[in-house]
Amino acid sequence: MGVRGIVARLVAFVLGVIVGFFGSLNAVFSDGGSTERVSAILLTALVVGLVSALVGIIDRGTGWRVALWVWMPGVAMLVAYVALGEYSAWLWAVFVAAVTFGAALVGVLLGGLSGGRTRVR
């Protein structure tokens, strides 16, 4: 892994922590109706996808596993939130984790394919 790979993973982790806290965690613990939660989850998924695409652009042709660097901080926060007593929110947490994982994968693959690179590891 070269300098671009290290920078890509560092950017992915730092932005993943920020999006995980302000996006994923907020989408689950905020009070509001289902429509507001789903809107927050979709917005969070969009941001996760954009961050993953940025990581894919920084390290073109990167593998799908780099999407985990963006996704995992938010999931770790969700797991901690549910484990610390908010058991009633576990279904929303699973939904957020699934949607953001899909967005992270799509983002990193599209970012890695941009610029004419036709193969993603």
Image (cartoon, helix red, strand yellow):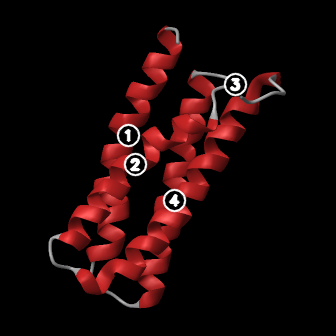
Amino acid on which the number 4 mark rests in the picture? Thr
Provide residue 86's location: percent of width, then percent of height: 21, 79
Q: Secondary structure at mark 3?
A: loop
On screen, residue 43 above or below 72: below
Q: Residues within 10 Å of mark 1 (few under 14, many from 20)?
A: many
Apparent side of residue 94 relative to residue 119 in the rendered image (left or right): left
Q: Secondary structure at mark 2?
A: helix
Amino acid on which the number 1 mark rests in the picture? Leu
Q: Residues within 10 Å of mark 3 (few under 14, many from 20)?
A: many
Q: Residues within 10 Å of mark 4 (few under 14, many from 20)?
A: many
User: Toward which corner of the image does residue 36 lie, by quadrant?
Assistant: bottom left
Q: Residue at x 40, y 48 (%)?
A: 72
Apparent side of residue 89 relative to residue 47 in the rendered image (left or right): left
- Per the image, the residue denoted by label 2 is 72
CA gap between label 3 and label 2 equals 21 Å
CA gap between label 3 and label 1 equals 20 Å
Amino acid on which the number 3 mark rests in the picture? Gly
Q: Mark 1 or mark 2, which is nearer to you?
A: 2
